[in-house]
Amino acid sequence: MPRISRRDWLRAGLSGALWGQCAMLWSAPDRQAGANPVGSGGGSRDTAFERGDAVPNFYVRAVTGPLQGKSVCYVCRNGDRPVVMIIARKIIPRLGELLHDVDQQIDAHRADGLRGFGVFIGPDSRKLLPQVQTLAFENKLNLPLTLAAAPAEGPAVRGLSDTAAVAVVLYRNQRVCETFHFADEPIDETLGRAVVEAVQALAEGRSNSPG
């Protein structure tokens, strides 16, 4: 992957503060794209969202959480905070465990501003609704889970590559810092731990100076 200079990112509109907060996530050698391709055992960084992309505002229907049953834009509500956005077109094995681990990080770093939400995409929302409710109940999730308002298209779908079942998008100031994609297979434990570590780093604002 070609190395992108700080100046290039600044020219693209990425603020110096955001560069510093995301630099460590971007520069770690084991986080390079294609390290574990989708469909070959659990996950990938090959994604529709690119690092530095703006996360668009979009509305979803809340299934769990304090805004249950309402149409809400969580991107709008979370503003410039560090956010974990999980997008799923299918409930794959170990997704509940991953959501639980992410939920724990959010609870532990709430004072740091860390927030998160999940978006589920499907052609039949009536069928998907009880599945999402069960997922939240069985894993004791505080993380708000939602249904995409436009399951066939729209900003939520853009977060997924064509071959991915689940994407985890980490962003701050509505700019993407890192993404993880999972194929239609059980979530690999090693990559699951990498997601949790990246979430913690995002919350704590740990960074390296760009070389």
Image (cartoon, rainbow, N blue to C red):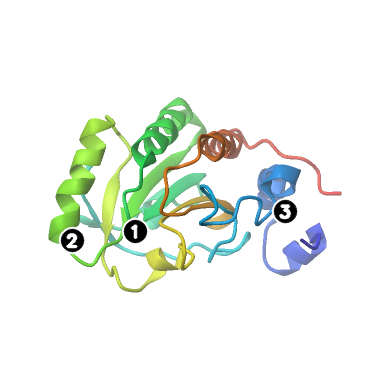
Residue sitting at x 37%, y 46%: 117
122 relative position to 19: left or right: left
Which quadrant is home to the N terminus?
A: bottom right
113 lies above or below 177:
above
Q: Which amino acid does label 2 sit on?
A: Ser
- Compare residues 9 and 156 and report the one nearer the observer: 156
113 lies above or below 170:
above
Looking at the image, how many numbered discs can be counted on the residues?
A: 3
- Outermost residue on the right side: it is 211
Kindly report the distance in space between the C-alpha atoms of the residues bearing marks 3 and 1: 34 Å
Picture coordinates of residue 166, whole percent (x, y):
42, 53
Residue sitting at x 86%, y 49%: 211
Query: Around disc 1, counting alpha carbons within 10 Å, would you say few (fewer than 14), some (14 to 19), or many (20 or more)?
Result: many
81 relative position to 123: left or right: right
The picture quadrant where one finds residue 165 is bottom left
Q: Nearer the viewer, mark 3 or mark 1?
A: 1
Residue with the mark numbered 1: 89
Q: Which amino acid does label 1 sit on?
A: Arg
Residue with the mark numbered 2: 125
